[in-house]
Image (spheres, rainbow, N blue to C red):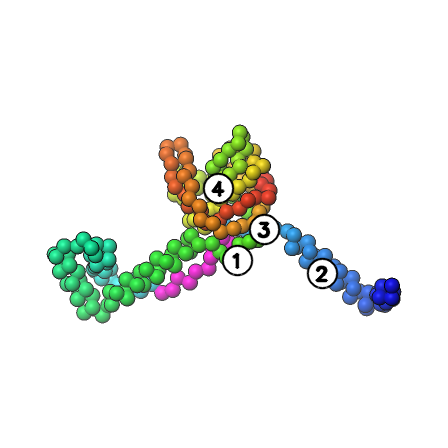
Amino acid sequence: MPKLKLLTRACRTPVLGRVWVLFLAICCATTAQAGEPRNLGWSDLVPTVAMGANPFEALDFRQKNDLAKLYRIEVKEADTANDFARTQALEIRTRLEVGGLDPDWLFSERERMMDEHTRQFSAPNQEVLDTTVRMPGYILPLEMKGALAVEFLLVPTVGACIHTPPPAANQLIHVRYPQGYPLRGMYDPVWIVGELQAERQLELVTYSDGQRSVESTYVMTAATVEQYR
């Protein structure tokens, strides 16, 4: 075993010995970190979106009102608008253009901003997908087996989806936990660990005085669910 003997002799020298120990320490630390879940907060689930300039901020009240009427007639009611409405739309369009505005460009900017807004509040953050994460939150049960929650929504705040309007879709995680978690009450605070995936889900959540459809962006089959401490 000549190579082993060479390595042993090298490690006897002070400098090479310290280098070898440092190398082993770095390798061990990297291995330990690779196996640990990544701690996430709810803000980490929101993608970075460049909203861009808002051209509507510079418009006065009348211009905004004219633009809204024009959009309703020419876009939303394009197939049903009567002759009076079409005449009114022509007058509005002319007034806006005389004022130096381009209605068609503003309509396209409206669509752009709506797309960006939708992405910010429903799209997943690609940087946190396919990684094992550790998240805090509250359990809103969807399916129970006896006293065990085997499927639930993890929500960021107490009362979310029931006592308050639902959070943005990318602020909800649809969790499956086949072994079940023993609930201690509605909105039990927990830590969950598992691999985060992107999958749009629409759930009908039942609460005391009715039902509500709730959309979520993320899914996870949890490896562990523990009481928050």
Q: What label does residue 153 carry, if any? A: 4
Cα distance in 3D space between marks 2 and 4: 39 Å
Residue 24 seen anywhere in this rendered image of the structure = yes
For image coordinates 15% across by 59% down, the residue present is: 86
Residue at the spot of label 3: 132
Question: Looking at numbered disc 2 in the image, what kind of residue is underneath it?
Answer: Ile
Q: Is residue 57 magenta?
A: no
Q: What label does residue 1 carry, if any? A: none
Q: Secondary structure at mark 1?
A: helix
Read off the magenta span.
Answer: 44-53
Q: Secondary structure at mark 2?
A: helix
Residue at the spot of label 2: 26
Q: Are marks 2 and 4 in contact (CB under 8 Å)?
A: no
Q: Secondary structure at mark 3?
A: strand
Question: Looking at numbered disc 1 in the image, what kind of residue is underneath it?
Answer: Glu
Q: Residues within 10 Å of mark 4 (few under 14, many from 20)?
A: many
Between disc 2 and disc 4, the foreground one is 4
Q: Is residue 196 above or below residue 104?
A: above
Q: Is residue 52 magenta?
A: yes
Question: Which callout, 2 or 1, points at the residue further toward the start of the chain?
Answer: 2
Q: Residues within 10 Å of mark 1 (few under 14, many from 20)?
A: few
Question: Looking at numbered disc 4 in the image, what kind of residue is underneath it?
Answer: Leu
Question: Which callout, 2 or 4, points at the residue further toward the start of the chain?
Answer: 2
Q: Secondary structure at mark 4?
A: strand
Question: Which callout, 2 or 3, points at the residue further toward the start of the chain?
Answer: 2
For image coordinates 53% across by 41% down, the residue present is: 176
Q: Are marks 3 and 1 in contact (CB under 8 Å)?
A: no
Residue at the spot of label 1: 127
Q: Is residue 93 above or below residue 188?
A: below
Question: Which callout, 3 or 1, points at the residue further toward the start of the chain?
Answer: 1
Cα distance in 3D space between marks 1 and 4: 21 Å
